[in-house]
Image (tube, rainbow, N blue to C red):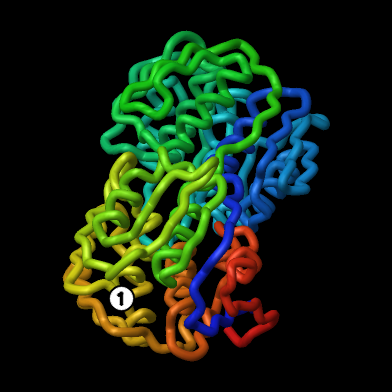
Amino acid sequence: MDAIRVRGGRSLVGTIPVSGAKNAALPILCATLLSDGESTLRNVPALRDIETTSALLGFMGRRVSCAPPVVTVGSSGPVRPEAPYEFVKQMRASVLVLGPLLARYGKVRVSLPGGCQIGTRPVDQHLKGLEALGASIQLSHGYIQAECARLKGAEIVFDMPTVTGTENLMMAAALAKGRTTLVNCAEEPEVEELGRVLNKMGARVEGAGTHVMHIEGRDALDPFDHAVIPDRIEAGTYMVAAAMTRGDVLVDGAPLEHLEALAAKLRKAGVEVSREGGGVRVRVPGELRGVDVTTAPHPGFPTDMQAQLMTLMTLAAGRSVITETIFENRFMHVPELVRMGANIEVHGNTAVVTGVAGLEGASVMATDLRASASLVVAGLVANGETEVRRVYHLDRGYERMEEKLSRVGADIARVRGAEG
């Protein structure tokens, strides 16, 4: 099992390129199930989740060439409309095949997602929406089994915004008969990106990335060629890393328009954030100040940046209050930061961070994807050596993080086969 070793104390200086957005690429790969012919997705990051999705599509009978930054998916014969547990347990996003398979083939069998490290993420909104479109659904032996001769457009109101739920129903509605209206949709940029791809395929999607979406279904859809948007969370992580080390970094390709909530908090904390060319430059001209943060669905402060910002606040003057409203178990990085010398107290879904003079290197354990990133960022400034173990979490969402950080001055390396 690999680990990341970091020796702290170096400021990051230079340019860090941003890879394509994993959370945009995954639903788009699933959308290839909606058509025959060969679809091409470009600017795809080389990540474990991309490999898992490609393997799942191959299991279903699609012809897949997974060679990031390009992935092609084509039809090669009969499709097996099933996503077994061995795939879904690796990656909850596998449930995104539910909508396109049902819409295209009239039946589907998908494993229910199991537990999640950062909290429960039920699929009830997915199923409620598909039933409204006419599907017959049964839950049996840990699987979702759904059938429908042809889905029909309907109005569906989500009980709460759900990214994968919105995406599943967008794909299902693209082949449904008639018009579908989705209300209380997730507004994330990755949802908007899926809408662009569905329109390229011949569907008519209006309002993707807003609260209300209208979709005119088609009898058939075409393959596509598309370059995925930059990863806003990867970009945000490197923005925090630059601020943490008091460096001077151009995060090349960072989509500032998708990062306004983060940028606002960084500026309030004393970080200089400015658009430069096709990216964002980050500097810290003075003292870091504590800021309060509450996570919220987009365009609010993203839960996927909470751990990284908390790490920055461990060195900020004063006190910061961070409230997590999205996932109930998303403070699992806190005990590891405390082991490094951070002063953090957790009260339910709120963490109170009091800034300290410095952090100390230690062996720490990654518990999930964003926690992994926060511990690497902490290691960049900690006195001595930090070893972040179980970085297979990190490899699900960050493409060659240690290489990118090394190129801007970090003393960082991957240790192969480290003790887990």
Image quadrant where one finds the N terminus: bottom right
Instruction: Indicate the secondary structure of the residue bearing disc 1.
Output: loop
Residue 143 can be seen in this image: no
Instruction: Tell whether 155 sits left or right of 45.
Output: left
Residue 410, by quadrant, is bottom right
Where residue 279 appears, x then y in whole percent?
A: 51, 46
Where residue 137 appears, x then y in whole percent?
A: 45, 33
Q: Hey, which residue is sitting farthest front in the picture?
A: 285
Residue 255 can be seen in this image: yes
Amino acid type of disc 1?
Leu
Residue 21, by quadrant, is top right
Q: Which residue is mark 1?
A: 315
**Camera-side residue of 178 and 277:** 277
Within 10 Å of disc 1 (Cα), the crowding (few <14, some 14-19, many 20+) is: many
Q: Is residue 217 above or below residue 61?
A: above
Where residue 336 appears, x then y in whole percent?
A: 38, 81
Residue found 36% across the figure and 87% down from its top: 339
Q: Is residue 163 above or below residue 134?
A: below
Q: Hey, which residue is sitting farthest top in the picture?
A: 178
Residue found 34% across the figure and 69% down from its top: 312
Where residue 122 appears, x then y in whole percent?
A: 37, 48
Residue 105, by quadrant, is top right
Residue found 47% across the figure and 26% down from its top: 170
Residue found 36% across the figure and 23% down from its top: 182
Image quadrant where one finds the C terminus: bottom right
Q: Is residue 104 above or below residue 227?
A: above
Instruction: Tell whether 131 sits left or right of 84.
Output: left
Instruction: Tell whether 80 sits left or right of 116.
Output: right
